[in-house]
Image (cartoon, rainbow, N blue to C red):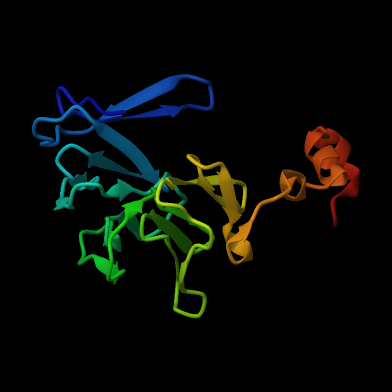
């Protein structure tokens, strides 16, 4: 949690006894702002001051970005936090190292990036570009998104390991792990009935079926 008024951040954790423990950090200099976004990268917290375009790492180090930039959604542990600017995807190392930049060569309206299974996904309305940036370069992709409109506005939705790019203005969606295939039947994304049944089965009923 963070207070835009005082600039103080705190971490809330639940103990094994169900009690809430609060550990407060020192205040961070956020300047005058009415819009603070908080995300977690593994156990590291990052703050995003949207009004001033400032990223504040847990160490207190700040990085400034142009107006219209977006902080990544909360993710699992990784070495960097990602920011999508109107013209680039930027990875800022959590240890304070030099940022890595994927320059698009054009501008657009970015969605908040998502990072899952070693890849970071980002998309820009207006320019209609999509980027998948993975560990190593073998699976990196930059491509145009077919069927986008001038009015498009993108947001990523994540459910388990499924990543969908949603144009929430025009009501279209794309399955990013299938080459930006347009989603025409949402039932195709639902798990098989047997998988749902297993997930609903209590743990004690599964003990006899686990391998040795």
Residue positioned most to the right:
208
Q: Nearer the viewer, residue 77 or 134?
A: 134
Quarter occupied by the N terminus: top left
| Left or right: 15 in relation to 33 | right
Where is residue 41 drawn, in percent x and y? 39, 48
Q: Position of residue 207 (x, y in %)?
A: 85, 42
Task: Tell whether 96 sits left or right of 176.
Answer: left
* Residue 163 seen from this side: no
Q: Is residue 198 above or below residue 14?
A: below
Kindly identify the residue that appears in the image at 89 percent across and 48 percent down. Answer: 209
Quarter of the picture containing the C terminus is: bottom right
Residue 128, by quadrant, is bottom left
In the rendered picture of this protein, how many numbered marks are placed on residues? 0
> Residue 142, located in which quarter of the rendered image?
bottom left
Name the residue at 23% across, 65% down: 99
Image coords of residue 115 (percent x, y): 46, 55
Q: Is residue 89 visible?
A: yes
Residue located farthest toward the bottom when viewing the structure as drawn? 138
**In this rendering, position of residue 6 left or right of residue 2:** left
- Return the x and y of residue 167 as percentages of the image width and height: 50, 46
Residue at the (46%, 59%) spot, across then down? 121
The foreground one among 83 and 175 is 175
Q: As displayed, is residue 161 above or below residue 159?
A: below
Q: In this rendering, is residue 206 above or below 211?
A: above
Residue name at image x 22 percent, y 39 percent: 50
């Amino acid at each position: 949690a963070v207070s835009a008024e005082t600039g103080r951040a705190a971490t809330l954790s639940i103990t094994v006894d169900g009690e809430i423990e609060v550990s407060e950090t020192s205040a961070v200099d956020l300047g005058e702002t009415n819009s603070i976004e908080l995300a977690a990268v593994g156990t590291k917290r990052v703050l995003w001051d949207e009004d001033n375009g400032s990223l504040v790492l847990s160490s207190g180090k700040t990085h400034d970005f142009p107006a219209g930039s977006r902080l990544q959604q909360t993710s699992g542990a990784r070495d960097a936090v990602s920011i999508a600017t109107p013209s680039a995807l930027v990875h800022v190392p959590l240890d304070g190292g030099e940022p890595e930049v994927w320059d698009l060569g054009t501008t657009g309206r970015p969605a908040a990036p998502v990072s899952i299974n070693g890849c970071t996904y980002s998309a820009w309305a207006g320019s209609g570009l999509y980027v998948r940036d993975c560990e190593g370069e073998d699976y990196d992709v930059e491509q145009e998104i077919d069927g986008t409109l001038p009015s498009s506005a993108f947001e990523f939705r994540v459910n388990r390991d499924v990543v969908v790019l949603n144009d929430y203005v025009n009501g279209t969606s794309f399955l990013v792990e299938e080459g930006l295939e347009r989603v025409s039947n949402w039932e195709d994304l639902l798990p098989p009935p047997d998988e749902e049944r297993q997930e609903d089965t209590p743990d004690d009923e599964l003990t006899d079926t686990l391998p040795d």
